[in-house]
Amino acid sequence: MTTEPLPAPLPDRAAGDVVVSGLVALAVAMGIGRFAFTPLLPLMMRDGTLTAAAGAEWAAANYGGYLVGALTAARFAADPRRGLLLSLLGVALTTLAAAGIDGAAAAPLGAVLRAAAGAFSAWSLVCASSWCLAELARLRVPQRGAWIYAGVGLGIALTGTLAWLGGRQRADRLWLELGLAAGAGALFVWSRVRARRPAPGEAQARAATRGRAAAAAPGPGRAPSGLVLCYGIFGFGYIVPATFLPAMAREFAPDPLVFGLTWPLFGLAAALSVAAVAQWLPEAPRRRLWACAQGLMALGVALPLAVQALWATVASAVLVGGTFMVVTMAGLQLAREERPDDPTPLLARMTGAFAAGQIAGPLLVRLLGPGRWAGWDALSGTGAAAALLLGLTAAWLWRVPQPCPVPARQPR
């Protein structure tokens, strides 16, 4: 009696597994590892766990950790799948550990944990992009890669909603709940990614491909530095409203049930915009898409500066939230088009520039201080500079619509 072999999974089902894995991974890594602290900070201050100064240190530590993670993510170029699983485990553990912080050690220990969470988040973004996009390209459905980036917005929206609805709880309880959610998400991704282990010989084939790509790669002068610069300015531009929107909304509506909605709204706009692009613009040129999104982001950053009203702040949340993940998606997909054989180093460079830009935004606000410059306070002046730079880079990206991929040499 012979046993018939089981049929191979259908391509659609395999692609769906990859997309869901990437979506959940980015929801955990970014929605919790990167952005959970934003809605929890006022609750920790309410509980007396953290002061405003210590909260700023935590945020700065997370930005710094994200930069370090971006600069070191290229070490997973040989196996981004391993880097993805390791980083998700790190996000879950650091989030759970934050639930136990209290007393005099809260400020320094929390800063260390937030720095580690930032590094793990950067690894997750780079490795999820590299692994998922490569798997979908191998399955001949690369256009589905856009869907994984909806996970970032969903993670932000869910985290913000949990903090908004559960705001009567102590903040440490919310950290525990988010840590358990991150752990569940990491286990889910592990179960999906583990089932898609590379076939025998596939790792060696990838290494040979990377070797050919390195031999064919252009010198430093021809590297896509323009993309890296545009992505860094994107980090500088988005972080100002992303950091200060709830505070800006509070000036017009002191009720926390009103201004507290800006963060879930920001995340919901991010998720819906990516889903819309994935559904209706899957074949749109990534550079043109990036240019349009960056231009709309410039408008969203400038709007609260021109109109001092609650509706302008809400519109800014929608415009910036609705474009920052489209820019992320388009930029990282374009990096793969530029370096199809081995995109991880370029992904890491772009993510590093982004991290440096988002550090520069709040740093500039602090350097300008409480005075006024040409009639602008520090926040408004930084926002104006961000809007201008975003607009200029959007125009530059629009002028060069087609990427210039590096061809790999054919084996002899």
Image (cartoon, rainbow, N blue to C red):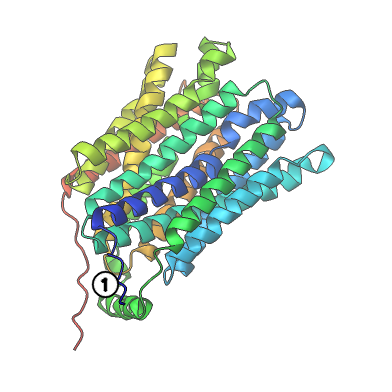
Residue occupying the point 25% across, 60% down = 137
| Badge 1 density bin: few <14, some 14–19, many ≥20, Cα 10 Å | few
Can you see residue 275? yes
Residue occupying the point 30% across, 71% down = 5
Report the side of 154 relative to 6 (left or right): right
Residue occupying the point 53% across, 23% down = 246
The secondary structure type at the circle numbered 1 is: loop
Q: Nearer the viewer, residue 184 or 80?
A: 184
Q: Position of residue 236 (x, y in %)?
A: 44, 41
**Residue 384 occupies which quadrant of the picture?**
top left
| Looking at the image, residue 4 lies above or below residue 41 | below
Image quadrant for the N terminus? bottom left
Q: Which residue in the rendered view is the most extreme toward the front?
A: 1
**Residue 222 occupies which quadrant of the picture?**
bottom left
Can you see residue 391? no
Q: Position of residue 80 (x, y in %)?
A: 43, 64
The residue type indicated by label 1 comes to Pro
| Looking at the image, residue 288 lies above or below residue 240 | below
Report the side of 412 relative to 31 (left or right): left
Q: Nearer the viewer, residue 124 or 182?
A: 182
- From the image, tell me which residue sits under label 1: 218
Q: Position of residue 268 (x, y in %)?
A: 40, 29
